[in-house]
Amino acid sequence: MQIVFIIVSAVTLFAGIQTVSNRNLFHAALYMMLSFLGVAVLYGMLESAFMAATQLLVYIGAISILVIFAIMMTRRLMQATEPAFNSQWQWGGVASMLLFVLFVTVISQVFVVNPNVQGAFFPPAADEAIRNSVVDLGVSFVSADQYVLAFELASVLLLVALVGAIIVARPDVPDNEMEEAVVVEVVESAEMEAELVEVEAAEEEPTEAVPGGH
Amino acid sequence: MNAVPISWYLIVAAALFCIGLYGLLSRRNAVAMLMAVELSLNAVNLNLVAFWRYVDPGRPAGIAWAIFVLTVAAAEAAVGLALVISIYRQRDSVVTEELDVLKY
């Protein structure tokens, strides 16, 4: 289990480093998908099948595709020899290394000072809890004393993001063009109505003529 | 059987977060910056799920929070990429250093 963990996390971190350092943005996006996959395997090792499946669907299935579309629509610029990193990339590296050292210090402080702190090791039992965790999660999303408000707010957030993304990404249509389009539409529909009336009249005539003929 | 202590997960998540932070600080392309943010959000989710499993697997609080983080990440990616496409259409560039209209 430790071997599997080490291999999976090494692949995840390597793919993450490639994501932020590869010059070719398309390759960087593919490495990002590999990194997401590694995190999904770690979710599986944490016995959270629902999170692993959601990671596959949402991150690898949806967000990565969005990113790749964006890269394909804008890639012409990054094919050039212009630099992929800004002028302060060293400082960014130093800052993130310092933050990592800080994280490792805090984590090792907690677990060196008190190695048997609650939750330090994998709880062996709780099979029942794991099996019911998806049901519990679903119930917690709709029960009034847990997360129903946050759940509904999340749905509103997704709707707003959907509408906002469409409005932001839509090509600009100038106002006068918009009005012209509306006018043309109105004229066309008026013409079509006129035609329809004529056709109806033409259809009515023979029906009147037929009983008249007999 | 499962002898991996939680501190390993925390350190992997911390490393992934710092990689994402480095990408956010050093990249020039807005799409690459968004990719780095997604890596960081993944690290946060890994932390949440690890704490859920090791500390309190009986209640769904950790996973529920991770799902909300994931929802916000999806919304952020959609709006962010729409902004990038819109900016690209108007300025013919997605390099963040050249987006300086508001500076003057």
Image (tube, rainbow, N blue to C red):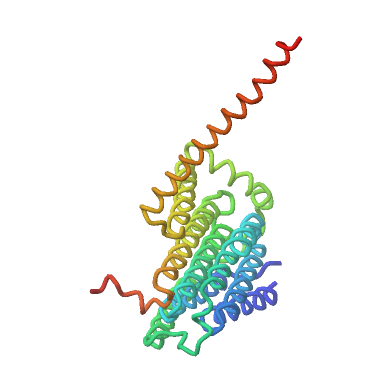
Which quarter of the figure is the N terminus of chain A placed in?
Answer: bottom right
- Relative to A73, say whether A96 is above or below: below
Of residues A212 and A165, the one nearer the viewer is A212
In the rendered structure, the answer to whether residue A105 lies left or right of residue A196 reads left
**Quarter of the image where one finds residue B4:** bottom right
Of residues A43 and A204, the one nearer the viewer is A204
Question: Most extreme residue toward the left, as rendered?
Answer: B104
Q: Position of residue B77 (x, y in %)?
A: 49, 62
Question: Most extreme residue toward the front, as rendered?
Answer: A213
Question: Most extreme residue toward the right, as rendered?
Answer: A214
Q: Position of residue A96 (x, y in %)?
A: 42, 80
Of residues B4 and B90, the one nearer the viewer is B90
Q: How many marks?
A: 0
Q: Position of residue A20 (x, y in %)?
A: 51, 80
- Relative to A186, say whether B91 is above or below: below
In the rendered structure, the answer to whether residue A93 lies left or right of residue A118 reads left
Q: Position of residue B21 (x, y in %)?
A: 44, 75
Q: Residue at x 53, y 66 (%)?
A: B42
Of residues B48 and A211, the one nearer the viewer is A211
In the rendered structure, the answer to whether residue B72 lies left or right of residue A139 reads left
Question: Most extreme residue toward the bottom, as rendered?
Answer: A81
Which quarter of the figure is the C terminus of chain A placed in?
Answer: top right
**Quarter of the image where one finds residue A89:** bottom left
- Relative to B9, say whether A86 is above or below: below
Q: Residue at x 31, y 75 (%)?
A: B100
